[in-house]
Image (cartoon, rainbow, N blue to C red):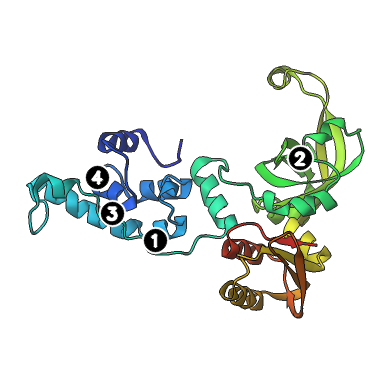
Amino acid sequence: AIKGVGENAIEAILAARTKPFAGLFDFCARIDTRKINKKVVEALVTAGAFDLTGKPRKALFECIEPALQQGASEQKDRESGQFGLFGGGAKAADKPPEERVFGKEEWSERERLALEKQALGFYITGHPLARYAEEVKRFATHTCASLATARGFEKVAVAGIVQGWRERLTKTGKKIAFAMLEDLTGARDLVIYEDIIQKYESLLKADEPVLVRGMVRLAEKFGNEAQQQDSSEPSPEIKVDEVSRLVDVRTAKATRIELKLSAEQATSEKLAELKSLFGKFPGSCTASLSIVLPGASETKIALRSLRVAPSDDLLAAVDRLFGGKVAQVR
């Protein structure tokens, strides 16, 4: 289910879908705009309902208002028996309106995934942790799944997204918090005491990839909780000691950015855009470019005059520029 899209809206969409929708403007022209408002269309766009049009979600989102205005006007014409100023009859009425979505800009991966999760309650086109695969390999000692083999009191470092934050007071009046750490393999419980809450609460609630360091505790599961897990065996949870944003871990440890391009990708226009992009993200990392030529030979070029920051925004922009993942942080 898409949050904000209720039963009445779904029924109105199904009633209008006598044939596939050609795009956003066609959708808004055929629906009953009295039953489907702007918030519903925004939720559909951010959930990816119009991705098959090939248009960027950001560009679609920015066109919702004019699409709804045009749709309301066409609905009024239909109800009054008109099909436009110059007539045209049923054939003109059946012709999809022009899809006037001309923008090329997309949200950053972080924005797109955050909005997607807000609409759906989960990620569907990616995961915020995926872009940190190298950092997870280098700095995490375990995944959520591999914690199943961890020993009690073992010191661990696990990367993931913190979800489901909840707090209560202990018998002594101190705060204690509980949450789930989710990665690409599963999820594990976190226990956070008051001193750690005071130091890291903003990071733990930021809904972005973090590296959690702490100690394994083997928690007994009882009653319904044990039945849900089909086991009463102790389940590993992490008593949190330290939290770092993965982007900060990367920035602190990174020394260079490596790009690998095919000869087809390495056009003079694209390389000029790449240089301009690098100029927008100054930092301390060196950069190198490898161009794979036909016949599998490879030419490596050190970009000695450039120093860049290994930020998520830069890496995402580089990947968008070349139509795929071409950059690695070392």
Question: Of helix, strand and loop, which one carries label 1?
Answer: helix
Classify 10 Å Cα crowding around label 1: few (below 14), some (14-19), many (20 and above): few
The residue sitting at 64% across, 77% down in the picture is 275
Q: Earlier in the sequence, mark 1 or mark 2?
A: 1
Question: Residue 301: x percent and y percent?
Answer: 76, 73
Q: CA distance from mark 1 to mark 2?
A: 39 Å
Q: Which residue is mark 2?
A: 190
Q: Earlier in the sequence, mark 3 or mark 4?
A: 4
Q: Nearer the viewer, residue 11 or 168?
A: 11
Q: Please, which residue is most extreme toward the bottom here? A: 305
Q: Amino acid at mark 2?
A: Leu
Left or right of 224 in this view: 212: right
The residue sitting at 29% across, 60% down in the picture is 66
Q: Which residue is mark 1?
A: 62
Q: Nearer the viewer, mark 1 or mark 4?
A: 4
Q: CA distance from mark 3 to mark 1?
A: 11 Å
Look at the image and tell me whether residue 241 can be seen: no
Q: Nearer the viewer, mark 3 or mark 4?
A: 4
Question: Residue 8: x percent and y percent?
Answer: 31, 35
Disc number placed over residue 68 in the picture, else none: 3
Question: Residue 243: x percent and y percent?
Answer: 79, 53
Q: Amino acid at mark 4?
A: Arg
Left or right of 230 in this view: 104: left
Left or right of 250 in this view: 206: left
Question: Of helix, strand and loop, which one carries label 4?
Answer: helix
Question: Of helix, strand and loop, which one carries label 3?
Answer: helix
